[in-house]
Image (spheres, coloured by chain):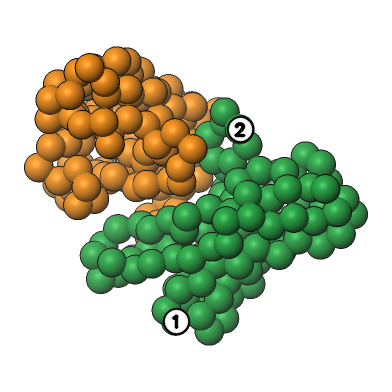
Chain colours: A green, B orange
């Protein structure tokens, strides 16, 4: 089964840029989707298909994907961005979605 | 607006069973695949099952295969998950989610708020 690796935690000061990585074998050839989950809430997709944003998601959220690493970038970080972030891809070898282990973003 | 509302969670003894339901509204259920995803306390997201629009295609994660059964009733706008032979490791919040599935890719654009299943004696 395909494995996605995320750092357990990422810390950033308000107003700075946060980068959350998602590692996987040749992940660059897959479409990567990113979810934000705040405590006690359901996840919300913030980036899909590597770099597209659903309506209502601020432009501060962006994504990139190449080689063995996908990255979610959050610019001008705000306190309200503090949450867990999960990457997700489709595992074509087993015909099911796979989630990364999640990264907790802390705004200092 | 799209809404997914789960129900049926609760406390169950090891070896017991439970049936979860997900009531869908704001869209035509029969047009979409549907899925269940769970999250153990303090842990990450784990996909566990999805079902095609007609129910003819079903996949399960290895961790629940043979114990859980996904089903749907498009006429009742409902998705179900039958949980059997439960163990403590099945303790989790169970989310109903609507996937967008296209050309060998899938992501989840709407999620319910989840229902908590606790397996304990």
x and y percent of residue A98 in the render?
Answer: 38, 58
Identified at 52% across, 58% down, the residue is A87
x and y percent of residue B110 in the render?
Answer: 49, 39
Q: Is residue A25 above or below residue A92?
A: below
**Label 2 chain ID:** A
The residue carrying pointer 1 sits among few (fewer than 14), some (14 to 19) or many (20 or more) residues within 10 Å by Cα, namely: few
* Quadrant holding the N terminus of chain B: top right
Q: In this view of the protein, can residue A71 be seen by the observer? A: yes
Disc 1 is placed on an element classified as loop
- Mark 1 and mark 2 in contact? Answer it, CB < 8 Å: no
Residue A39's disc number? 2
- Residue A79 lies left or right of residue B50; in this view the side is right
The answer to which of B77 and A88 lies nearer the viewer is A88
- Tell me, yes or no, whether dots 1 and 2 are on the same chain: yes
The answer to which of A101 and B65 lies nearer the viewer is A101
Q: Is residue B98 above or below residue A33?
A: above
* Quadrant holding the C terminus of chain B: top left
x and y percent of residue A73 in the render?
Answer: 71, 63
Identified at 53% across, 53% down, the residue is A102
Q: Which residue is mark 1?
A: A26
Q: Is residue A99 above or below residue B115?
A: below
- Residue A84 lies left or right of residue B75; in this view the side is right
Outermost residue toward the bottom in this view: A67
Disc 2 is placed on an element classified as loop
Q: Earlier in the sequence, mark 1 or mark 2?
A: 1
Residue B80's image quarter? top left
Q: Is residue B119 above or below residue A91?
A: above
Identified at 54% across, 62% down, the residue is A6
x and y percent of residue B10 in the render?
Answer: 32, 15
Outermost residue toward the left in this view: B66
**Label 1 chain ID:** A
């Amino acid at each position: 089964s395909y494995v996605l690796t995320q750092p357990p935690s990422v810390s950033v000061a308000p107003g700075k840029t946060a980068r959350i990585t998602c590692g996987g074998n040749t992940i660059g050839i897959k479409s990567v989707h990113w979810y934000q989950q705040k405590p006690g809430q359901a996840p919300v997709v913030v980036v899909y298909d590597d770099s597209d944003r659903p309506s209502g998601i601020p432009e501060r959220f962006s994504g990139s994907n190449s080689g063995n690493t996908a990255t979610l970038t959050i610019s001008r970080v705000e306190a309200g961005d503090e949450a867990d972030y999960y990457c997700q891809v489709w595992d074509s070898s087993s015909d099911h979605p796979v989630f990364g282990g999640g990264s907790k973003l802390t705004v200092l | 607006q799209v809404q997914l509302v789960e129900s049926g969670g609760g406390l169950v003894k090891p070896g017991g069973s439970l049936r979860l339901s997900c009531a869908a509204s704001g869209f035509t259920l029969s047009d979409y695949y549907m899925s269940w995803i769970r999250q153990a306390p303090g842990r990450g997201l784990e996909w566990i099952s999805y079902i095609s629009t007609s129910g003819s295609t079903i996949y399960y994660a290895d961790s629940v295969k043979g114990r859980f059964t996904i089903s749907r009733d498009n006429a009742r706008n409902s998705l179900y998950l039958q949980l059997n032979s439960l163990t403590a490791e099945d303790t989790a919040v169970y989310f109903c989610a609507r996937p967008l599935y296209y050309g060998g890719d899938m992501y989840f654009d709407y999620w319910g708020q989840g229902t908590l299943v606790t397996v304990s004696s």
